[in-house]
Image (cartoon, helix red, strand yellow):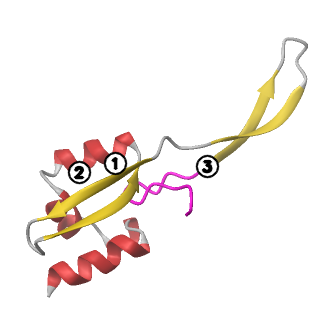
């Protein structure tokens, strides 16, 4: 499974660990992902997604997964969420 948020599209970042002597070694900053199940009231079905805390707050702000997906532009959504959006539009 890919390490990115399906709502906000946050992905791993590459940076450096810096020691006391200022040596730099490469490292990866992973997003804080949680596997969460959302229930769609329109489809009467639940969906499991990997979401970061910012994505959870965004869904809460839009009062549910259905409203968030309906009001979002396709360019901002992942492939899995675009499939759910097509099902909601039917």
Q: Tell me if residue 9 is in the magenta stretch.
A: yes
Q: Residue at x 56, y 53 (%)?
A: 11
Q: Tell me if residue 24 is in the magenta stretch.
A: no
User: Would you say the residues marked 2 and 1 are in contact, meaning their CB atoms lie under 8 Å apart?
Assistant: yes
Q: Main secondary structure of the magenta part?
A: loop
Horizontal side, residue 47 vs residue 41: left or right: right
Q: Residue at x 12, y 51 (%)?
A: 63
Q: Is residue 44 above or below residue 9?
A: below
Which residue bears the numbered disc 1?
Answer: 55
Q: Is residue 59 above or below residue 54?
A: below
Horizontal side, residue 29 vs residue 61: left or right: right
Q: Is residue 67 above or below residue 27?
A: below
The numbered mark, 2 or 3, whose residue comes first in the sequence reads 3
Which residue bears the numbered disc 2?
Answer: 59
Magenta residue span? 1-11
Horizontal side, residue 83 vs residue 15: left or right: left
């Amino acid at each position: 499974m890919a390490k990115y948020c399906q709502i906000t599209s946050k992905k791993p970042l590459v940076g450096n660990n810096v020691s006391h002597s200022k040596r730099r070694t490469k490292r990866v900053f992973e997003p804080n992902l949680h596997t969460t199940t959302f229930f769609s009231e329109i489809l009467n079905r639940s969906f499991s997604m990997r979401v970061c805390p910012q994505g959870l707050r965004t869904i809460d702000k839009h009062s549910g997964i259905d409203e968030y997906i309906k009001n979002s532009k396709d360019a901002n959504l992942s492939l899995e969420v675009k499939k759910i959006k097509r099902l909601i539009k039917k």
